[in-house]
Amino acid sequence: MVTHVIGTAGHVDHGKSTLVAALTGIHPDRLKEEQEREMTIDLGFAWLTLPNGESVGIVDVPGHRDFIENMLAGVGGIDAALLVIAADEGIMPQTREHLIILDLLGVERGIVVLSKIDLVDDPEWLDLIESDIRHALQGTTLQNAPIVRVSANTRAGLDILLETLEHLLADTPSRPDLGKPRLPIDRVFSISGFGTVVTGTLIDGCLNLGDEIEILPKGLKGRIRGLQTHKKKTPYAQPGSRTAVNISGIEVKQIQRGDVLTLPGLYQPTQRLDARCRLIPDAHAPLQHNSEVKVFVGSSEVLARVRVLGTEAIHPGEEGWLQLETYSPLVVSRGDRFILRRPSPGETIGGGIVLEPHPQKRYRRFDPQTLEHLSVLSQGTSDKTLLVTLQNAGPLPLSLAAKRAGLTTEEIFRILNDPDGSKHFFALAAVDSPNEEPFLFTLTQWQDLQRKALSIVEHYHHQYPLRIGIPREALRSQLRLSPPLFQAALHQWLRTGMLSEQGQFIAHPHHKVRFNTQQTIQVEHLLRRFAITPYAPPTIRECIELVGQEVFNALIENGTIVAISDEIAFRKTDFQTMVRFVILHLKNHSALSVAEFRDHFQTSRRYALAFLEYMDALGITRRDGDVRILTPQGEKVAQTLTD
């Protein structure tokens, strides 16, 4: 089972490709120009079987300085490195640059291969070279790496190298399966009869035969028609394996190195990211704010503008915070390592780690809160990472919070179930279905949202004291919440009694509509007018002239008056009397005419027709020619109006 990928590194002509061929039987130099010049130009790939039976992928990278950027496309996904140094030459400038790159990428496991020992007869010379190597490794991630002497030509030391590699990888954890597979593409080609094939080192999840896939950042959709690892067909590919994917639905010309193959909806391209950066001591100049750099991450290479945060510039040997704004989209995740190079003259100047792949805004460069935010992110603990993610992005559905924070859903549930979790986070259950994922807030965000909701409702009561409450949609709009999130939050507030609900209106639970003395006198006068001619009452326009729009609306909302049209309203008691008459009449007779209704209540045709049309609209009656008949549900509907 393939679980690891190793990469070669070292100066040109130090025997990396020859060593790979001796170990695997596969010569990684596949290009005609490489074979003619006897020099690796682009990435080469091979695999070997260790003594314990484990199959390991190998990425062979160019050693010549002219092809250093091709080298960077191949080392991003490796678990360990073989740093190849020729015994007859020792450490060369390109060796040091490769060592710096491995250090910046955080490659902590490796073996120094002292190659071409057949060209050196003096044992003391080999000891001297090893001493120089140990000195060069000091302070790097490979400072404790074993040194193995080999000759690819005579095969001396190869068995020891394989045993050392087996021991090294036995202590190397397998790449985690986060359920979010991505394959940074380092090679694209076509095979006759099969079509488009891409290769890369799979990370963060598994791919399965038949999966629908997406090529980012272009957003191309296709499907996996075949998977191979080391030219062996497989129904699935695991994280950490060198993987070839045969894709249907996408042409070769549509894909390039640096694109990322993933499943739809898992990742979102970005052109801005927050990062921690370290400048190498040998950089020729400080990294200035607003300077242009090349960013290498995964197999991608993009130009970017640097925003240095918290200081005027990052000097050689120093670390600092950056916000990188790329000229073209990238697909990255929190924790990804990257390398920075100056575009011209070409120079590796530093590298770092992605802290936030989707910052919401440009930061003020010297804002203390921003610097504290980045500091917390760089500490890397799951709970702090989730906290900062939510602080930066706002409340999120659980799965999206996991994706933004670079965590698994299991890790988030562990955080929420921890006793300390309730001190920092609030999980708001969805309403539509108990199986739907919750929305995650920081506790402060949830408390702030509650205070804001109460403030909006109380302000509305102050502004409109005669209204029973604020319309639901108006409250949602002012809170700027999506409908699902608002529905979940409102459900929680109603359940806990923080707010109350009357139809489509939301109110403070202690709010009561109360008329002042003058308004009370006006209402009593209006109701006396209704009592004089209950079935031919004042029109709505006349009512408003007597008591005002707000008081009249309050009478409608509290049920004292029922408006049946834009012009006509009745007292509730009179309205119910008319409804009961209609039901009783239609139960004893087959139909009811406008004239019969008019004559019974000694009203005008205008009021009678308006009322019967309202009964039609409610579904109690149905017009049949010049009469009304009772609908099948009419009596049930009427009962709700007269209770």
Image (tube, rainbow, N blue to C red):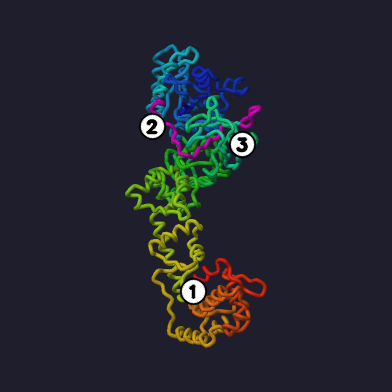
Vertical side of 358 occupied by 584: above or below: below
Pointer 3 local density, CA inside 10 Å: few below 14, some 14–19, many at least 20? many
The outermost residue toward the left is 419
SS of the residue under disc 1: helix
Region of the chain picked out in magenta, as a range: 168-196
Residue 626 picture location, percent across and down: 66, 75
Q: Which mark is residue 386?
A: none
Q: Between residues 132 and 157, which one lies in front from this camera angle? A: 157
Q: Nearer the viewer, mark 3 or mark 1?
A: 1
Q: Is residue 324 left or right of residue 429?
A: right
Which residue corresponds to mark 3?
255
Please say if the residues under marks 3 and 2 sit with CB atoms less than 8 Å apart.
no
Distance between the alpha carbons at the discs numbered 3 and 2: 39 Å
**Cα distance in 3D space between marks 1 and 2:** 86 Å
Whether pointer 3 and pointer 1 mark residues with C-beta atoms closer than 8 Å, the reply is no
The quarter holding residue 109 reads: top left
Asked which secondary structure carries label 3, the reply is: loop
Q: Is residue 553 magenta?
A: no
The residue singled out by tag 2 in the image is 139
- Residue 150 picture location, percent across and down: 45, 16
* Residue bearing the label numbered 1: 642
Ranked by sequence position, the earlier of labels 3 and 2 is 2
Which residue is nearer to you in this view: 436 or 167?
436
- As displayed, is residue 91 above or below residue 422? above
Along the line of sight, the residue nearer the viewer: 117 or 18: 18
